[in-house]
Image: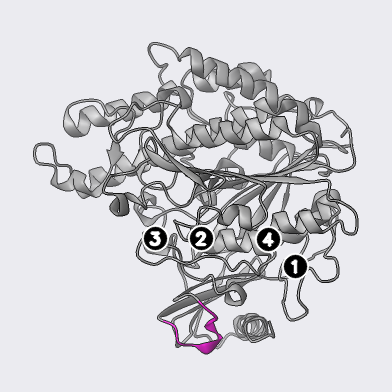
Amino acid sequence: MPFLALILTWFTGLAVGTPQAPATGGSSPRAHAALAYTTAALSAPIASHASATSALPAPAAPPTSPLALPSAAELPATPTRATPNVLVILLDDVGCERLRPFGQGAPYARTPVLQSLAARGVTFTNCYSNPLCGPTRALLQTGRYAFRTGFGPNIFPNYQFGLNHLETCLPELLRDGFAPGPSPYVSGAFGKWHISMYVDTTHPNDCGFGHFAGCMTNVSDQSELFGTFYHNYHWRKVVDGVESIVGTPDGPYSERQWAGSVQARDAAEWMLAQTQPFFAQLAFNPPHAPYQVPPFSLISPASRNAIEALGVEQIGVPYGEGDFAWITDLTHPTRPITEEQLRRKKLLFYDAMLEATDLNIGDVLARIEPKLADTMIFLLSDNGPESSVVDPARYDPNRAKRTCYQLGVHVPLIVVGPMVSTPGRRVDHPVGVVDLWRTIRDVTGAREVPGMIPSDVVIDSRSFLPYLADPNAPLGRRYAFSEVFNPIGNPANMSLGARQRMITDGRWKLVRTGLDDIEELYDLATDPREIQNLLPSSNTTIKAHRDELALELDSLIYSDG
């Protein structure tokens, strides 16, 4: 099926893998325009150097025909210059379990753009983050683990701090890493920042970004401070230190105010305007809470029908654009719903927000189509989903975001671009979000020049560029590590209120919880949902794997730096 027909078929209401009743009324002109942009972008030369394309193997059953993925014939192209652009797309609170390319079992959210990127690039099946938004963003920017930077907890309205300006962030690496000559790169950041105090509105610029346009935190986090409820249609936007207000508390609810659409538009316009290689970071606020119905122009008619039908079922009227799934639904004075109804409502709204973000990504790729042949795209997430949008029939909600279990830290990573060889394949070796720092260094040709990194500062990042260039590249990083702790600071002093850490070789995983380091061991090959803790055990094989991981974890944590 041609890709244009594929996308249009999806948008007329056919679910991924499961036929749905056709939607009534068709889609809006804006939706058709967005899909035309998306189709143009995804037919563009995103990947190159490909002499062969292997099918993306998936543990789950493949989708049935309305959604066949692009063929090798749609992957031509040669980059026009040696110095590529770099675009990092950061999703918020999105784990692997809702995304079809990672094959963890239906139902999946509708993400045709992301699926096309997976078919055109390399999908990393064992990528790990920290279990919270801010700490993972600090990993990405510094290439250093949280116990080195002190960035273990998250930033909240009543608990604020910032990433130390002495850290060398990615745009500073690209700014200074070509000395003694000038850097070819310009850098821009868009969307959610969340690694500084809210009032420190120049922090992104101070970290090396020449331009920033976005939100300092989650859209609703500053509500109490300013006495108004902020949400995805009404939020505080910062542009290079200057703050303004988008939208109003009560609408209108359109793409002109929707945080994801504004952030996508800002990023695309900036990238198009650059005349030299760029590094762009686009970090979407949606689908992070508050869970809210996105503009209907960003979702399929099938999704709209499902949202409206749920409203009729639960409260007697259709849910519409801008409606929330919120705890106050349980105590609504005239139309209260049950906890189970709220759970269903949240999950449906969350999936719709993820679907809308997918179309926002497609819109960005379409708008920067003239630059795609020279652009390396890294798509990843900061952590897994909130417990309230986890299906308890499939997963334990207590092991989601904020924990080092798989649902909290096993995140998607897809890489597409001119340095990708043999697109459409998977890499099962362990990698971490921390590894993007040195991978982007190698992609751009930057160097850690003398004086850039103090001699007593340890960079934990390891480049996974060999995995992109060579399907047969040997194992690089042997273990992936994740942690969360509170309060902020160097946890070596052990004066912590809470702590959890994990280390994995991709199959065996050791989790340590609390100041007493209570241990759990899981075999992810046979127990990917971590149901059976294998410790304590007298089995020599199990003990050997535990001892190997424990030794590596202790060596890392108590290393210098």
Query: In which quadrant of the rendered image does the N terminus lie?
Result: top right
Q: How would you rate the neighbour count of disc 4 (Cα within 10 Å): few for under 14, some for 14-19, many for 20 or more?
A: many
The residue that disc 4 covers is 169
Residue at point 39% right, 52% down?
A: 390
The residue that disc 2 covers is 196
Q: Position of residue 451 (x, y in %)?
A: 81, 71
Q: CA distance from mark 3 to mark 1?
A: 29 Å
Q: Are marks 2 and 1 in contact (CB under 8 Å)?
A: no
The residue that disc 3 covers is 396
Find the residue positioned furthest to the left. 334
Residue 553 seen anywhere in this rendered image of the structure: yes
Q: Is residue 414 magenta?
A: no
Residue at point 53% right, 61% down?
A: 409
Q: Is residue 491 magenta?
A: yes
Residue at point 58% right, 85% down?
A: 539
Tell me which segment is drawn in magenta.
489-496
- Amino acid type at circle 3 is Asp
Query: In which quadrant of the rendered image does the C terminus lie?
Result: bottom right
Q: Are marks 4 and 1 in contact (CB under 8 Å)?
A: no
Front in this rendered view, residue 301 or 274: 274
Residue 301 picture quarter: top left
Vertical comparison of 453 with 71: above or below = below
Q: Earlier in the sequence, mark 3 or mark 4?
A: 4
Q: CA distance from mark 4 to mark 1?
A: 22 Å
